[in-house]
Amino acid sequence: MKKVFVNSFVFVMLVALTSLACSSKYPGYDKTETGLYYKLFKVSKDTIKPKLGDWVSLTMRYTYKDSTLFDSKKAMGNPVRFQLPASDFKGDIYEGIKMLSPGDSADFIVNADSLFKKTFRQPSRPSFIDTNSVIHFHIVLLSVDSPQSMIKKEAESLQKYISEKKISIPPLSSGLYFLETAQGKGIKIDSGMWVKAHFKVSLIDGKQIFSSYDRGEPLQFEYGKRFDTPGFEEGIGKMLKGGKATLVVPSKIAFGETGRGAMVPPYSPIVYEVEVIDVQTKADHDKQQAEDKKKTQLKLETAKKQETELMKKYLMEKRITAKPTASGLIYVEKVKGTGAKAMAGKKVKVHYTGTLLNGTKFDSSRDRNEPFEFTLGQGQVIQGWDEGVAMMNVGGKATLIVPSSIGYKDRDMGTIPPYSTLVFDVELLDVK
């Protein structure tokens, strides 16, 4: 009888457990005491698990129903890296990450309302996500680094760099290594002065972060006001006009324990190659600014005076006799359209080529093989376009000669100088 009783008891328990498993809200998932559902796919041999304040590197994908909301591999091309914060709520994704070791991968199910409001700090969940629904996360933990281990790694990598580069001078009290390669001349750089400098910035492994040389012009900044890192400012303060130097900057006077985005990891020493092009006192800088402003104003006034004469010359050479509208627009119809009329509030599709009066092309939808669409009369384009396209029908072609007063006025648009009359060859393709 006793044997029969035990077998029956085991059978009942197995049935109960099977029933419980089958009735689980998310089959195949385990549940923590805080209510976080998780499923481990790969368990590494590493026993290290991230703690509050550790830096983690991971790939992350999260989905809602059948839609992917974010995929770090596609969106960034690099792993997500951040310092692990305290949990925002019971059963949040940070709790799940703390369960993993480097090499582990897992799925987690997180409440959508709490995720968007508390973790993502949004006013509310997106409208397309139902209330009390869930977000599915897939996480692969790649690495875990404590601040202490990262400080140690920085010291080791910095010492290796100093040794390999055979740097024999000691660092300054701040930790900065100042290596002058060319001595400058002139006044000492002091607070309030304006410095024009070329510089390259790299990690100590040689990976370039920034170069003003690539931009084609040096950068100008007021010394004493925060422009870059404290190490950069300290180094600049030891230089003169024409001087060149290498600055080896430890993280504590660079980008610190947080780094700078994907370009500069936390606790990263960086290297500057600096060349001081010019140094000005505040008085000299202000004087030059005033002179430059005066020259710019004179140039604008000259361009404004010349615009009318240049347009007259253009119209005469092209034998254009069309009269300007009240706004100054000259509309030259090339092909009369027979389709729908372009009207304010309608969405129009056009092909166009834009040139200056001297024939210089500055833009063309035809070259891109991509028609341009906009809503007419809504200020989405320059005034001359809103007015000119409204005079067309689908299938029509016209030249719009647009004076600057209904174009870009006195703005410098790069390829379009201030006070430029513009010529557009426009074809109206569609009206909706």
Image: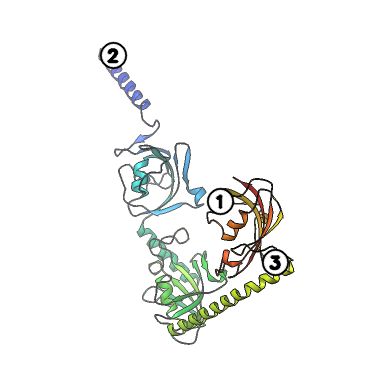
x then y, percent, for residue 115: 36, 44
Q: Secondary structure at mark 1?
A: loop
x then y, percent, for residue 184: 50, 84
Q: How is the image coloured?
A: rainbow
Q: Is residue 383 above or below residue 15?
A: below
* Side of 315 relative to 417 (left or right): right
Q: CA distance from mark 2 to mark 3?
A: 102 Å
In the rendered image, the residue lying farthest to the top is 1
Residue picked out by circle 2: 4
Which dot, 2 or 1, sits closer to the camera? 1
Which dot, 2 or 3, sits closer to the camera? 3
Pointer 1 local density, CA inside 10 Å: few below 14, some 14–19, many at least 20: some
- Comparing 301 with 78, the one in front is 301
Q: Secondary structure at mark 3?
A: loop
Q: Quadrant of the C terminus?
A: top right
Q: Is residue 345 above or below residue 27?
A: below
* Residue at (46% x, 75% y) in the render: 221
Pointer 2 local density, CA inside 10 Å: few below 14, some 14–19, many at least 20: few
- Name the amino acid type tagged 3: Gly
Residue picked out by circle 3: 359
* Side of 184 relative to 266 (left or right): right
| Labels 1 and 3: the sequence-earlier one | 1
In the rendered image, the residue lying farthest to the bottom is 186
| Labels 2 and 1: the sequence-earlier one | 2
x then y, percent, for residue 363: 64, 60
Residue picked out by circle 1: 344
Q: Are marks 2 and 3 in contact (CB under 8 Å)?
A: no
- Name the amino acid type tagged 2: Val
**Count of marks overlaid on the render:** 3
Q: CA distance from mark 1 to mark 3?
A: 30 Å
* Residue at (56% x, 75% y) in the render: 300
